[in-house]
Image: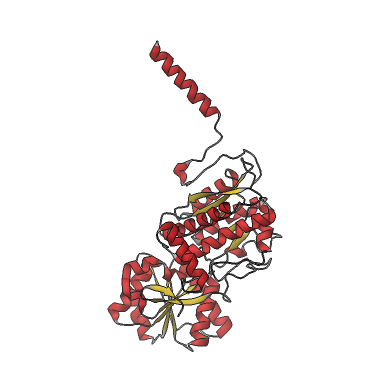
Amino acid sequence: MKKTRWWFTLAMVLAVGAAGCGPQLDQSSGGQSGGQTQAGAAPGSQSSGGEFNVGLAISLSGGTAKFGEAVKRAAQMAVDEFNEAGGADGKKAKLIVYDDEAKPEKSVEIVQRLIQQDKVVGFVGPANSGNAKAHIKFAQEAGVPEIIPVATGTTITQTYEKEDKNYIFRVAPYDKGQVETILKWVVEEKKLTKIGLLHDTTGYGQGGKTDVEGVLKDKYNMTLTATESFQVNDTNMEAQLSKMRDAQVEVVIFYGLAPEAAQYLKSRQKLNYYPLTVASWAMGDPTVKELVGDLVNKDVYMVQSFTIDQSAESKAFHDKVVAKYGEDIFPIASAQGYDCMQLILQAVKKAGTDPKAIRDAIENMTGFTGITAIGEQPFTKENHEALTSSNMFLATYRDGVIVKP
């Protein structure tokens, strides 16, 4: 009888506890933090009057995990600083984080969760252009602002530019702007004419090819001397580089991600052929240096929006990240992630927690002080790119550290 009463009492306690709980996040789907939300409430409404939710939907696993982890740490730092400073009208921010695993279908799932269940007032993400293209319609349709810290596909922010209100913003060097920055340096400053392009066959590389060919033709009335491609996971690019050498290519524009960038640098060494190499910002992924060491130091340039030596403020930010986390695993991604979250939080201070008002405040923000090369007025109604060819720049490796040339 005592045993029966004990089990009955335990069952009653559990039942009362369950009855007092609202809907919970399924942590197995990648949520890093969760919270209760009001069923059927409008986006941005919160279950707690003293707290509002901001989101992060980005890869914390998969090929772009370093990008995502750096953004996550910086976004959390921005939220912590906002809360320590008193929040907005006493309301504190809560960061809800999900891993999209670098998969478009997962990205769609977690963005809908952030909007519908977590009721975020705005969110940051993703790292992959394919993921952005798959999910931005949900942010646009729900009227919840999204600021992209990594994904660089040119057309992403243009998808809804004809709408009365475009909810998609970006603080990352978008692809066409990167190409304009590269070609201005190559053609106008270095006066080089024999230009080769080596790109991967994914949407990222194909988009880069389209942009390079388009800008060369439209702005400089030029064509590429040689064009070669490679597959993801290719481990040897000597054949492509041999063709570049035979064509007397002076500069190779490289469009691919870190593992293949490392193989490219190894192939240069094997052939003892070192054309000037100018790459998209992905060449600055720390993975490249981890895979090839000192090979990064020889005539390799890449587009950036941030370097540690850019200014006293950028050095101070880097030191702050290191002090908090023990390292700064991907400095440019940290800086862009921080600026993205700061834009949302500063908009909350100006406009409150209604997502539509936050969108307007982001678009009309003035006097913004960023960590990246972002301007004081990052956006306009016509332009949702905070980083353009006017404020991107080329950087290089010196002793394994990315610096301004």
The picture quadrant where one finds residue 302 is bottom left
Q: Which image quadrant is residue 61 in? A: bottom left
Question: Which x, y percent locates residue 188?
Answer: 53, 87
Q: Quadrant of residue 364?
A: bottom right
Which residue lies most toward the front here? 85
The residue lying toward the viewer, choosing from 405 and 85, is 85
Furthest toward the top, the residue is 1
Residue 184 vs 23, above or below: the answer is below
Residue 81: tell me if it is visible.
yes
Q: Position of residue 32 (x, y in %)?
A: 47, 47
Residue 15, placed above or below residue 152? above
**Closest to the observer, 3 or 195:** 3
Q: Position of residue 358 (x, y in %)?
A: 66, 55
| Image quadrant where one finds the N terminus | top left
Is 199 or 380 nearer to us in this picture?
380
| Extreme-bottom residue of the structure | 191
Q: How many marks?
A: 0
Q: Give left or right: position of 178 versus 352.
A: left
Looking at the picture, how far across and down is residue 268, in whole percent?
Answer: 32, 78
